[in-house]
Image (cartoon, rainbow, N blue to C red):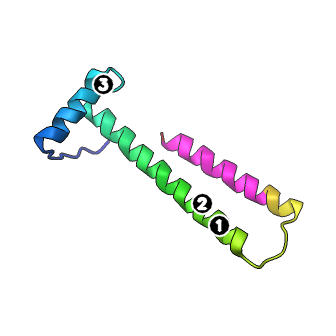
Amino acid sequence: MQSMNISLPDPLKQFVDKQISTGRYSSASEYVRELIRADEKRKAEQQLEAKLLEGLNSSEGDLTPADWSAIRKEALAQVEARKKRR
């Protein structure tokens, strides 16, 4: 695992310390990792939404059962890949 040092202004450092004191996180590193994972998830959801909207707005024909099967297979593969990264 790589190490990274960050600098925070006092109010942000106090906020992080308060989050740790709640007992949900054992360290500042754990808290930051959770924030990064949440941001990663949010961005993936935004990309999915954009692709869905693009598909809805496209002029291509209806999807076949084989198309839906391929889409489902790809979605499940992406979910599994995310689980493995955690």
Label 2 sits on residue: 49
The amino acid marked with disc number 1 is Leu
Magenta region, residue range: 70-85
Choose top left, top right, bottom left or bottom right for residue 22: top left
Gap in Å between the C-alphas at discs 1 and 3?
40 Å
**Percent from the top left, x then y, of residue 6?**
18, 47
Label 3 sits on residue: 26
Question: Against 19, is 3 above or below?
Answer: below
Question: Against 66, is 84 above or below?
Answer: above
**Percent from the top left, x then y, of residue 26?**
30, 24
The residue positioned 83% from the left and 66% from the top of the image is 63
Gap in Å between the C-alphas at discs 2 and 1?
6 Å
Q: Are marks 1 and 3 in contact (CB under 8 Å)?
A: no
Q: Earlier in the sequence, mark 3 or mark 2?
A: 3
The residue positioned 75% from the left and 53% from the top of the image is 72
Q: Which quadrant: the N terminus?
A: top left
Left or right placement of residue 31 versus residue 58 in this view: left
Mark 3: which secondary structure?
loop
**Percent from the top left, x then y, of residue 70?**
77, 59
Choose top left, top right, bottom left or bottom right for residue 49: bottom right
Question: Against 41, is 29 above or below?
Answer: above
Q: What is the chief secondary structure element of the magenta stretch? A: helix
> Which mark is nearer the camera, 3 or 2?
2
Mark 2: which secondary structure?
helix
